[in-house]
Image (cartoon, rainbow, N blue to C red):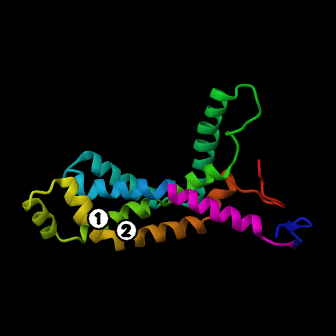
Amino acid sequence: EAPSSDLLGGGIFPAIYGTVVCTLLMTIAGVPVGVATGIYLSEYAPRGSRLARLVRAAVQNLAGVPSIVFGLFGLGFFVMFVGRGIDDAFFPGESPVWGQPAVLWASLTLAVLTLPVVIVTTEEALRTVPDDLRAAAIGLGATRFQTTFKIVVPNAIPGILTGVILAVSRGAGEVAPIIFTGAANFLPYLPTD
């Protein structure tokens, strides 16, 4: 049930509901981008590519950033820049609709927070697939795309799923980014409008 008496009694249903919704939205937003980036870095990026080195450096830097910094980034970018930009474009002169803390912005912030885990584990899982399988597929006439998505990725699925589970559990456990971008200190009922 919902809390009552200014958090002196009652239940925690809004907190559980918010965690589940935020985790689902975070997974939908972050996992496809992270897996696609890991596949690109492992299978498609040229060996000495500047872009690949730049992306890997950015991922390593993101992995070392504290979650509170991600929260401030989410507040500044998603709420103040994107949300207010949408409000200015579609609702000029009205009270903020998108330019305020919301579960959507909190989920996107957590998706950015979990990206390094998904990217690195996907890339490492794809590296564990033997090169002999790639060479055999290409030798049989498969294209690079077919080799990647019919041979390499299916063999790397256990490692990719492990990374996704680690990322989702990290995102679900992080509280600091949510304070700025989508949480309420006291929520006696679920917002329905």
Q: What residue would you read off at disc 2?
A: 160
Q: CA distance from mark 2 to mark 1?
A: 9 Å
> Label 2 is placed on what type of residue?
Ile
Query: According to the image, label 1 marks what residue?
Result: 153
In the rendered image, is residue 70 in sight? no
The amino acid type found where label 1 is placed reads Val
Q: Secondary structure at mark 1?
A: helix
Give the residues drawn in magenta, as a range: 10-28
Is residue 87 shown above or below 26? above
In what element is the residue under mark 2? Answer: helix
Q: Position of residue 8 (x, y in %)?
A: 89, 71
Quarter where residue 5 is shown: bottom right
Q: How many marks?
A: 2
Rendering quarter of residue 38: bottom left
Magenta span has 12? yes
Q: Is residue 186 left or right of residue 153?
A: right
Give the camera-side residue of 64 and 152: 152
Q: Residue at x 46, y 61 (%)?
A: 64
Residue 107 within the segment the image draws in magenta: no
Task: Estimate the x, y position of residue 32 in percent, counting from the top left.
Answer: 42, 56
For image coordinates 56% across by 53% down, the residue present is 109
Mark 2 residue crowding within 10 angstroms, few (<14) / some (14–19) / many (20+) = many
Tell me if residue 158 can be seen: yes
Q: Which mark is residue 110?
A: none
Q: Toward which corner of the image does residue 93 lie, by quadrant?
A: top right
Which residue of the protein is positioned furthest toward the right in this rendering? 5
Residue pictured at 47% horizontal, 71% vertical: 166
Which of the two discs, 2 and 1, sits closer to the camera?
Answer: 1
User: Do tag 2 and tag 1 residues touch (Cβ < 8 Å)?
Assistant: yes
Residue 65 point in image, percent of width and height: 50, 58
